Amino acid sequence: MEEQLILYVRYTAKPGCRESFVRDIVEEGILTQIRKEDGCLAYDYYFSAQDENEVLLIERWESAAHQRVHMEQPHMARLRESKDKYIAATKLGRVHLED
């Protein structure tokens, strides 16, 4: 069995755009579609209490292969459009979990 993959993504929103970014993802149905994808174990957004422009995304996938397929889904193009509109910077980290 392949290792599970956890990604943590730190978004820095353009000033005043943090809530709009997440609202777009929810209202467009993108978040629901992602959570229904094969291999998606968790996909959750969190607002920083210390930084009004920071959004943290925690993703958990059954495998790196599942996450690669996820990135090719049509709704991810819509997410990238929202990201281009509202996000100033992105930092990514990853952890592989062994059984």
Image (cartoon, rainbow, N blue to C red):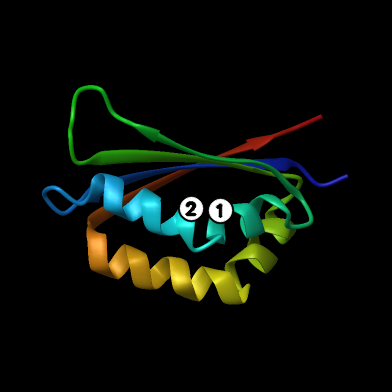
SS label for mark 1: helix
Q: Residue 31: which numbered mark, if any?
A: 1
Residues tagged 1 and 2 counted as in contact (Cβ below 8 A): yes
Nearer to the camera, 43 or 33: 33
Give the answer, above or below, for where 69 lies relative to 1: below
Q: Residue 59: which numbered mark, if any?
A: none
Q: Is residue 82 left or right of residue 37?
A: left
Q: Amino acid at mark 1?
A: Leu
How many discs mark residues in the rendered view? 2
Question: Which residue extends farthest right?
Answer: 1
Mark 2: give few (<14), some (14-19) or many (20+) Cα within 10 Å. Answer: few
Q: Amino acid at mark 2?
A: Val
Give the answer, above or below, for where 97 lies relative to 50: below
SS label for mark 2: helix
Give the answer, above or below, for where 40 lies relative to 72: above
Mark 1: give few (<14), some (14-19) or many (20+) Cα within 10 Å. Answer: many
Q: Nearer the viewer, mark 1 or mark 2?
A: 2
Cα separation, mark 1 vs mark 2, equals 5 Å
Name which residue lies at 24% across and 60% down: 86
Image location (x, y in percent) of residue 87? 25, 58
The residue tagged 2 is 26
Q: Is residue 69 left or right of residue 56?
A: right
Image location (x, y in percent) of residue 59? 57, 43
Image location (x, y in percent) of residue 73? 63, 72
Nearer to the camera, 26 or 93: 26
Question: Which residue extends farthest top?
Answer: 49
